[in-house]
Image (cartoon, coloured by chain):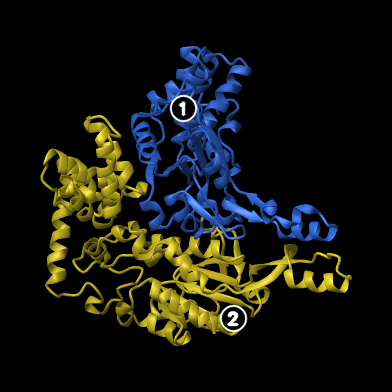
Chain colours: A blue, B yellow
Amino acid sequence: MESRFEGSSTYIATEDLQVAVNASMRLERPLLIKGEPGTGKTILAHEVAESLGMKLVTWHIKSTTKAQQGLYEYDAVARLRDSQLGSEKVHDIANYIVRGKVWEAFEADEPTVLLIDEIDKADIEFPNDLLLELDRMEFFVYETQQTVRAKRRPAVMITSNNEKELPDAFLRRCFFHYIQFPDEATMASIVAAHFPDLKKGLVNEALGIFFGLRDVPGLKKKPSTSELLDWIRLLVIEDVAPADLEEQRDKAEVPPFVGSMVKNEQDMQRVAEYFGLRRRKRR
Amino acid sequence: MFSGFFYGLRAGGVPVSLKEYLTLLEAMREGAIDYQVEHFYYLARACMVKDERYIDRFDRVFAEWFEGVERVEDPFASLPEEWLKKLGERHFTQEEMDRVKAAGGWDKLMETLRKRLEEQKGRHQGGSKWVGTGGTSPFGAHGYNPEGVRIGQNESRHRRAVKVWDRREFKNFDDSVELGTRNMKVAMRKLRRLARAGHEEEFDLSGTIEATARNGGYVDIRMHPSRENAVKVLLFLDVGGSMDDHVLLVDQLFSAARSEFKHFEHFYFHNCLYESVWKDSGRRHEETISTAEILRTYGSDYRAIFVGDASMSPYELVYSGGAVEHWNEEPGALWLQRARGAWERSIWINPVAERFWDYTPSIGMVQEMFPGAMVPLTLDGIERGIRTLQA
């Protein structure tokens, strides 16, 4: 049987995530990943591809993306232009079929991961338009009367940020996994995976501050894993000692470089107020 | 072999279809997991739950099915603690809560609350009305619960604790099939009028053919702006007071409307439209916008949607100074009429179920101002409303 995904040196996959990934790959069904922003939804596809030695094809979805664009587009304008210029290419319509990401994934000779990133950004009918293609792993090109069939069914991973509801018919075909926000122990191992040389004291202090920040009431966007990693990177670069963090915590001062974790102005104000309040209580 | 589990899930309110069940069986047959309970649990969850909202229910059913635990009939088991607290606050005064807490702590408090709710339920079924007992307006901001139990200061005080309970409305919010954002969006879409606007970015086939022909056969490519949603919408939302119950539903409507229209403005009001509205509910007292200005700014090409339960004391509608929160120079009805005059195409969406409209005089009064244009906040209602707006 094929190899199983078990996380990697820089990506800690919880057991439930591993089961979901492996089951979806085994049954060749799409895997829908949801979760708080910054919990590693997109990274997952990269890690799966890398650790299993598969090719990764990424299709980023925008609000204007149409399902057809993932399959192919017919560049009629180019053909019209070529016909005017008397180019030989014009006689073969296939020259003007521009392949999309899905086609690219279907065509690949090696095992492939197709990542459809942020599917909820597109129009609400978008997932429905892809049902058949993802189910049968084939589609028809009208211009050339040819059917494109996947050489090997790619592993399809889809991420969503919950901006829109996805249609039921689409959901029924997917495996689903919700990446939960990591608990402190998992978080510590994630940090250790990224910063193997970090001192234990600093990790503990940093995590304490980080989870404290997440507890500040009324934050619009709580800092998540990616923000924590950025912040620790800053701490390392600036060579902040654990003792400094501890001292600042005792004085209930706003943590250093908090801007890398709290990113909007209102939240920043909340945080400042929150620490101000705690300082006053202390006196 | 898992059919009991499957039906249990359906009974437990997890929307799972046969297709997903078969997927699970297939995965088992394929040996996608080794034989560990945890792995089976993860696999079943990935197959059968498609939205994090249902994970909690799934967990309950799973636990019950797997361990053979008796179903907890107790509805308390399925309610979030926050909600319970809120219920508690609604049904007990602070002193009562303190007293009960002192006597037996949280459990005791919940016990008492449960009894009280059961009592209410019995009475409700017994036929004595929770609505309008003794002539007091059921929606009045300072009403009493018919039993004389004073409830929370911040929320309106009427019969609903029980109603909400019986109808299990949280379930409906969960259940996207009934009335989810997606459905609302589909309904809202009916209002879309597409017109060409903006930059030239789309290939204009017929224009190009014509221009090419004129050009002696050499290609002259023409572009035109893409079609865009040209409907302009103003949304007025009633907040606070008796609208507290409908917050979730209104929120969904709001997000559906916001993403469907390009020209979209929203304003908040309380109970009835008066001389000022506001945009940010947190700063309603500091940053108000004059209604007269809005009437001036947004022309008759806008369509106005009012969302409110229209449940207030009639005084609030027809008298100067009738507003609950401030002194209003001119009665609310006058402002509503002005709005109707400014935006001919306007509707009133009422989250109160249609069959209860007759119980509240003010709903009828607002209805008179919006003849044929008051609709309930249901899919069908929204569709009807949209038809009215399209006319």
Tag 2 residue: B343
Q: Quadrant of the N terminus of chain B?
A: top left
Q: Quadrant of the C terminus of chain B?
A: bottom right
Q: Disc 2 to disc 1, how far (Cα)?
A: 61 Å
Residue B368 against residue A13 in the figure, above or below: below
Callouts 2 and 1 on one subunit:
no
Q: For the residues labelled 2 and 1, say whether their Cβ atoms are less than 8 Å apart.
A: no
- In depth, the one of B227 and A131 nearer the eye is A131
Q: Is residue B37 left or right of residue B257?
A: left
Which x, y percent locates residue B285? 54, 60
* Chain ID at mark 2: B
Question: Which residue does the image show at 55% across and 38% down from the upper left?
Answer: A108
Q: At label 2, which amino acid type do we have? A: Trp
Q: Which element carries disc 1, helix, strand or loop?
A: loop
Tag 1 residue: A52
Residue A87 against residue B205 in the figure, above or below: above
Point out which mark residue B41 bears.
none
Mark 1: few/some/many CA within 10 Å (<14, 14-19, 20+): some
Q: Which element carries disc 2, helix, strand or loop?
A: loop
Residue B239 seen from this side: no
**Farthest residue in the right direction?**
B216
Which x, y percent locates residue B341? 59, 85
Which x, y percent locates residue B370? 47, 84
Q: Is residue A6 left or right of residue A94?
A: left
- In depth, the one of B316 and A38 nearer the eye is A38
Residue B39 against residue B203 in the figure, above or below: above
Question: Which residue does the image show at 27% across and 63% down from the upper left?
Answer: B164
Q: At label 1, which amino acid type do we have? A: Leu
Mark 2 or 1, closer to the camera: 1
